[in-house]
Image (cartoon, rainbow, N blue to C red):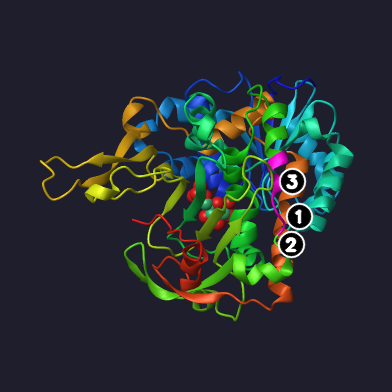
Amino acid sequence: MANRTPVGKLLLFGATGDLAQRMLLPSLYGLHADGLLPEGLTITGTARSENSDESYRKFAKDALEKFVPKDRMDAKAIKSFLERVQYQALDATDMAHYKDLSAKVGDVAGGLAIFLSTAPSLFEAVIRGLESAGLAGETVRIGLEKPLGYDLESSREINDTVATAFPEERTFRIDHYLGKETVQNILALRFGNSFFEPIWNARGIDNVQITISETVGLEERAAYYDGAGALRDMVANHMLQLLALIAMEPPARFDGNAIRDEKAKVFRSLRLIEPQDAPRDTVTGQYGAGASGGEIVKGYIDELTKPSTTETFVAIKAHVDNWRWQGVPFYLRTGKRMPTRRSEIAIQFKPVPHSMFSNRGGLLQPNVLVIRLQPEEYVQLLVMAKEPGLDRDGIRLREVPLNLSLDAEFAGSRRRIAYERLLLDLIEGDQTLFVRRDEVEAQWTWIDAIRAGWVANDMKPKSYASGSWGPSAAIALTERDGVTWLDE
Ligand code: BG6
């Protein structure tokens, strides 16, 4: 099937799981209520547990009631949405079950989109099952949710398995950060305005900081999270995607190939952190007890109830080795149980070459561009201004924010959750915001080198109090270069 053709059917694996309840069903409902789903599109849910169509519709309705904002709930729209929904139980390892699944889904000549989120160990069985039941042909495309492996080798295995049935142009790898409105705004900011580009390089920029901090802890995801850790869970995908959007060359067109080609070049230009540099350029931490998000919380080990050396915090000094970014550090930092929930990129520009104010006491700070992705959405440029006064005791200069609040500017328009856009793109066949195989492999190559450095140096995460910004070594990581993390 040619790209960009809407499909007539959707098949959701993991249909009774947490992601389905919180994100997928509410997103599909949102699209349905706005008339954006193709006419007649059916949604088949599948998972291990037994359900009739009726009991699954009830499950879906409960999920909407819990997770869709009240002002978006509309009885008529809910009713017609649930009419699209049906269910088929599946033991993913039992090939015989796929026949029933295929019978339930029905004829896929008009196109089928599959959303697959499954444990890496089940990929082989699922792909074989889909193929054997005729659910992998030309008219079928597949969306893959992470984790797609835990290192380069396992990710290659999964991608090879998927590729035996689905060629790259029918494979949609999800990184939900790419579905976020403000993340796409990075493209608008960089490539829709002329004034940043001349200084968007090593001549104009001193350093870049990317922070994704969360207040939540393990959240009943121990089975997955303890085997993953912050580096694989957040850096290998979301943070590197943000870095690529900041660092990439201007793509010629807003399309899947042009944008992904440029991102892939960034990933391939990331300087590998050699084992001997890991202790200097990376910091890992694990939260202990403390207070986060306004409550007293347990430490990671107590939550997990067994010993673990999994990192819940990581800070890294990265470099993109090309002309544009030579000598510009990219500081990355992410952690659970931090003081606030925040995703933010701070770009610190170079200081002016000479200060004409120094003989009059005026102190200058370098300009900073802050792109706040969540929870608020804004772009802020910190600029120097003169404090009002007659300046008899010298000129007083102060850093003040030039503010662009996207929340306020676009107050009338509804913010869609990332999965609304990504599911619609999957249904319509637009790959622009999905991750290509070469991107994923270049990401893992860089991540694996860091992990190898941790092993070689026997680096264990340092404990940090819940509600703090991580181990003090994370502060030293930037301070050594005379740079301070931009905290509130
Ligand atoms: C997921 C991670 O990919 O992203 C979670 O597995 C993390 O650990 C989540 O909490 C963060 O996403 P968001 O959209 O809340 O920033």
Which of the two residues, 100 or 196, is positioned nearer the viewer here? 196
Q: Looking at the image, which residue is at 74% across and 32% down?
A: 105
User: Which of the 4 quarters of the picture holds residue 101?
Assistant: top right
- In the picture of the structure, the residue carrying the numbered disc 2 is 449
- In the picture of the structure, the residue carrying the numbered disc 1 is 445
Mark 3: which amino acid?
Answer: Arg
Q: Which mark is residue 268?
A: 3
Q: Position of residue 155 (x, y in %)?
A: 78, 53
Left or right of 128 in this view: 114: left
Q: Can residue 307 be seen in this view?
A: yes
Q: Looking at the image, which residue is at 63% across and 40% down?
A: 324
Left or right of 165 in this view: 171: left
- The answer to whether the residues at label 1 and label 2 have Cβ atoms under 8 Å apart is yes
316 is higher (above) or lower (below) than 471: above
What secondary structure prevails in the magenta region? Answer: helix
User: Which of the 4 quarters of the picture holds residue 115?
Assistant: top right
